[in-house]
Image (cartoon, rainbow, N blue to C red):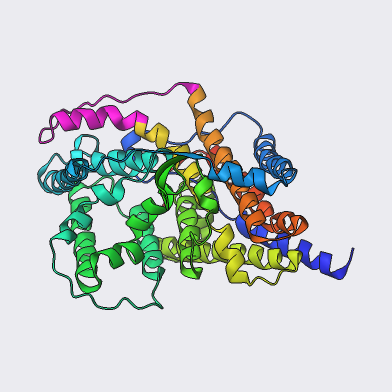
Amino acid sequence: MTTRRRRVVGWLAGAVSLLLAAGTVSAHGGSLAGGGRESITVPTWLFLSTGGAAVGASFLLASFVTDRSFIHRIHNWGAPLTVSDSRLPGVLARGVGLAGYVTVLVIGFFGPPTPRTNLAILLVWVGWWAGLAMTTYLIGNTWRTLNPLDTIALVLPSLDRTYPDRAGAWPSVVSLLALIWLEVVSPLADDPQLLATAIVGYSVLTLSGAVVFGRETWFAEADPVERVFRYYGRVAPIGYDERGLRLRLPGMDLSTPRLVDGRDEVAFIVALLWGTTFDGLVTTPTWRDLMAPLVGAGVPPHVLYPLALVVGFGLFLGAYWLAVRLSCRLTDTYLGADTVAKRFAPPLLAIAAGYHFAHYLGYFLVVAPALWVALLSPLSDPGAVPIYEPPGWFAGVGIAAVVVGHLVAIWVAHAAAYDTFPSRIQAIRSQYPFIAVMVFYTMTSLWVISRPEVSLPYL
């Protein structure tokens, strides 16, 4: 083995070791569902190796597709959709968003204190973050129209200050990590008044930014929630392009050039991935066992959570850039690392969507009856609320969602590679580091899903 190949193997092993430190999806607010993950009965080694092999085999199969015109036809397939000229649907959607926003604040401050019967808690976690987010990557993005803060910003004055180019998407990266930390360490899913207070604080910050820099600029650059839904919408089969509203194959829009324009947007995608990973990691017995000696040594637990969040994000981002540099070396391309990083970051959104769906479909179905009861009687506490119990086989849906998300990401990365590199050999070689990351990331994610869910330790 040549020295160069030894270095490549060593770098890949380093990236793998970084990824093995974490896992995937859980959800804050698990107390609403009344349960959590349970250990699987299949041997862990078989479970993990099967998932990793499925992702690796899909890359091998995709590698045989080297016909650029065929790839192009798949990614450009679509059918135009008729859009009504009437403004009524948009006005109604904005009205629904405002009504939901007011309802969350009023019920949050004055409604029942029990999480399972409080409409504000249920609307935010079940209706919005579970239900609406799933429709975003399964159907299409409606959040920009429903977003009540965007509607309020329409009637506010604007100072139209110049948004600094150096800032880019970095404020949304920091804000997303801060929201993840707040979601994990605080009882936002258990305390309606705290949730309403947090929404008020977020609203003040968001509307202030819209007034200073302009509504369009703020929501396009700095707002993390808007960016999450916009990116998830790129996975959906319905979306806008230069030809208008179209029906397309799910995930195919992720191979579009210039979907990501800089290191800041690459970092946001990685932060989105790491956020779902961190949310699941901290509810595993392994995290509890790791924390025990540190807390026993006198390290405050409230320091460990943000520290793990920041360090894990740094490791994930570093692993991605390691894969980028390895890809550049393997292809011997004239393209810079930034160009390669921007082209291969969007496929990760399919993985993030798969992770989200893996948990939140079951979560939504379990708690949706309680949401319906709360909608019928928002100011009263019915005491007992109905909970749907999914069948035993339903756990396989989450596993399938994780694997399918990776398979879509692999195909989209394959298409992006053929669109980026002139040589077929370059296109295939460019994917080696990213596929290695995806394989082991899949195995790590499935490992977390296979672990029983425990309460957040020391919180």
Q: Which residue is drawn at 47% across and 47% down?
A: 280
Residue 174 visible at all: yes
- Point out the residue furthest to the right here: 1
Residue 237 percent coordinates (x, y): 45, 40
Assess whether residue 107 is covered by the magenta stretch.
Answer: no
Q: Which of 436 and 190 is in front in this view?
A: 436
Location of the N terminus by quadrant is bottom right
Assess whether residue 375 is covered by the magenta stretch.
Answer: yes
Q: Residue at x 35, y 78 (%)?
A: 164
In which quarter of the view is residue 42 placed? top right
Residue 367 percent coordinates (x, y): 31, 31
The relative height of residue 262 versus residue 449 in the rendered view (above or below) is below
Q: Which of 246 and 12 is in front in this view?
A: 246
Please report the bounds of the magenta region as a residue range. Answer: 365-392
Residue 423 in the figure: left or right of residue 365: right
Residue 269 percent coordinates (x, y): 48, 58
In which quarter of the view is residue 32 placed? top left
- Point out the residue furthest to the top here: 391
Q: Residue at x 54, y 49 (%)?
A: 23
Residue 339 percent coordinates (x, y): 59, 68
The relative height of residue 41 versus residue 225 in the rendered view (above or below) is above
The relative height of residue 399 versus residue 169 in the rendered view (above or below) is above
Residue 455 visible at all: no
